[in-house]
Image (tube, grey):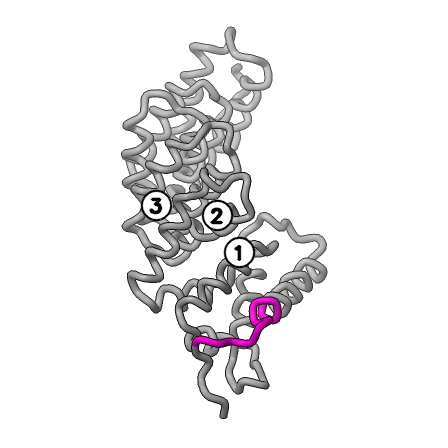
Amino acid sequence: MEQKAKNNPEAHLEERLSTIYNELCEKAYNNNPDMDYDSMEFENVLNECQTVWANTLLEDKGFTIKDFLFNLDFGCLCTLFEYMAKGDFPVPMEILRALDSFGEQGVLYLYNHAFDMLNRKEEPGLYISIQAVKGLGRLHKSQYVGHMLTYVTGLPENEDMLIESVVEGIMEMGPVGIDEMVECINGTKNINNNLEYVLQALAQLGKNQKSTKIFDCLKSAFLRMKNKDLGALCIAEYGDIRGISVLNNFLDNNKRSLQREVFFEILHCIKELGGRTDFF
């Protein structure tokens, strides 16, 4: 068997591993033309591509890709991460796990890239930052939820791609981030574009972790935000029937002043929650 890969992988390692991965992902798209590519179902298909990729045998080395990754030195692994981050698909989870195996060194590497995206928005390195912030979430580094919320609320409101990327990283953390999300939303008077992304994430995460504090946060945000239709959609997404009363009362008090599109969007949300709308 060959010696374990250390320090000096072959010149085209990144391209070779990327090609194997891209072919698997492209095949997944081609084999599922009728699937919603934004659905959890298709996300699971892509996750399976990552598993297959990690278990692929590199015959000339006598290792699977997974084993090979965990025998790369830190510098080579970082180079591979940065190469894969610029591709069309999420960085394979096994690369993130390999970085995490270096402990604090690996996590700080992701952290330093993750929170530099605003400085890189006109550079190719932006995608490294985007994959890094999502990587912190995928590795469930919950100690950074507060950093992510502070960062995302401080981004310019027109930087939707950056805002969405950070919020996706927070969502990858799972329910562990809910308390800090509630605190962030409740602590802000104006619900701007940045916080609207956080609010949507809270509704999605919270619907399987229902609590009074989450519902009260969604209700309060709805009442003080300008974008009422989005606030109503968040209440409907959360799926608590108490939302029917909140939305009914709001329409009763404001139906004459609402734009037609907003009025009917809120009606739709009431229906989604199981409420009646025939008396409006």
Q: Can you give x and y, in whole percent of width and height, for residue 67 in the image?
A: 46, 78
Mark 1 or 2, nearer chain start: 1
Q: Secondary structure at mark 2?
A: helix
Q: Amino acid at mark 1?
A: Ala
Magenta-colored stretch includes residue 11: yes
Q: Secondary structure at mark 3?
A: loop
Few, some or many residues within 10 Å of mark 2 (<14, 14–19, 20+): many
Q: CA distance from mark 1 to mark 2?
A: 8 Å
Residue 113, placed above or below residue 28: above
Query: In front: 192, or 225?
Result: 192
Of marks 2 and 3, the one in the foreground = 2
Q: Can you give x and y, in whole percent of width and height, for residue 66 in the image?
A: 48, 75
Q: Which residues are magenta?
A: 7-17
270 relative position to 215: left or right: right
Query: In front: 267, or 20?
Result: 20
Query: Which residue is label 3 attached to?
Result: 209
Of marks 1 and 3, the one in the foreground = 1
Residue at image point 35% right, 38% down: 149
Q: Are marks 1 and 2 in contact (CB under 8 Å)?
A: yes
Query: Which residue is label 1 attached to?
Result: 85
Magenta-colored stretch includes residue 266: no
Query: Which residue is label 2 attached to?
Result: 130
Mark 2 or 3, nearer chain start: 2
Q: Amino acid at mark 2?
A: Ile
Q: Secondary structure at mark 1?
A: helix
Q: CA distance from mark 2 to mark 3?
A: 27 Å
Q: Can you give x and y, in whole percent of width and height, for residue 244 in the image?
A: 42, 26
